Every structure is written in C-alpha cells, then in structure tokens.
Amino acid sequence: MPNMKIYIDEMLPETSVLSLRSALVPIREMLCAELKVDKSACQFAILKVTALEVQPRVNVELMILPKPDRTQETVSEVCGKLRAMVSEASGHHVAVRAAALDPQTYVALK
C-alpha cells in the first residue's frame, strides 16, 4: 500500500496539474510493480498548496508499510523513479520524501 500525496504550488499553471493527473496511472503501475502491491492498495491525492518561492514547487510524500525487501536502497531507487515521473509530468523540480508507517498502529478503513 503506497499512500502518496503530491503537493503542487497553486501558482503553477493548471496544465501542470492536468499533466500530473494523467500521470497517476503510470505512476501507480510503477509503484505497484516496484513495491509488489496490488493497485487496489494505492491511495493517491494531488493537493494545491501555497508554497514559499524558495521551496520546490512540487513535493511528493510517499508512505509505505515496511517489508523485508523494502530496504533503504530499494526505497531510494523507487523514490528516484517517482521523482523523475512527477518531474516529467509537472515540468518542474520535484522533492520526494518517503517514510515507513508503523504496521502495529496503522489502520485503514475503506
């Protein structure tokens, strides 16, 4: 289950948001393949935000459950692919942050 939020500066052109929406399916396919999860486990959102000019205009937060094969190196590689895909879609520099959820306390009701 990857939970992904893409924060995009509200001052960027609407075409960047539309392009990101179009890229969500390929991004989901990549994340599911790399993290070995079913697409039904994904939860994605694109959020317009007010950002400082000195920050990247597009930020991605990826939350995943830990697994033995999700090493720091593997997660870093996935984040690199994610960054490239979001950057290509948005046309802007992208920052990506990933964190592991605590499986003992994580609850998801769908």
Image (cartoon, grey):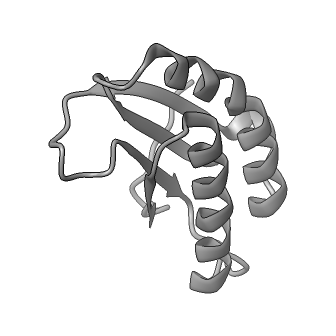
Q: Is residue 35 left or right of residue 53?
A: right
Q: How many marks?
A: 0
When the figure is inspected, residue 28 is found, relative to residue 54, above or below; the finding is: above
Expressed as whole percent of the image width and height from the top left, the position of residue 66 reads 57, 69
Q: Closest to the observer: 45 or 85? A: 85
Closer-to-camera residue (27/41): 27
Percent from the top left, x then y, of residue 98?
A: 46, 62
Q: Is residue 25 above or below residue 106?
A: above
- Rendered image quadrant of residue 38: top right
* Above or below, comparing residue 37 to residue 50 in the picture: below
Question: Residue 22 occupies which quadrant of the picture?
Answer: top right
Relative horizontal placement of residue 38, taking residue 66 as reference (left or right): right
Residue pictured at 59% horizontal, 64% vertical: 79
**Near-viewer residue (100 or 9):** 9
Q: At x 68% / y 61%, what residue is drawn?
A: 81
Q: Quadrant of the C terminus?
A: top right
* Residue at x 63%, y 84% (from the top left corner): 73
Residue under the point 18% across and 43% down? 53
Please provide percent x and percent y for residue 75.
61, 72
x and y percent of residue 67 in the render? 65, 73
Q: Is residue 71 above or below residue 9?
A: below
Residue 51 occupies quadrant: top left
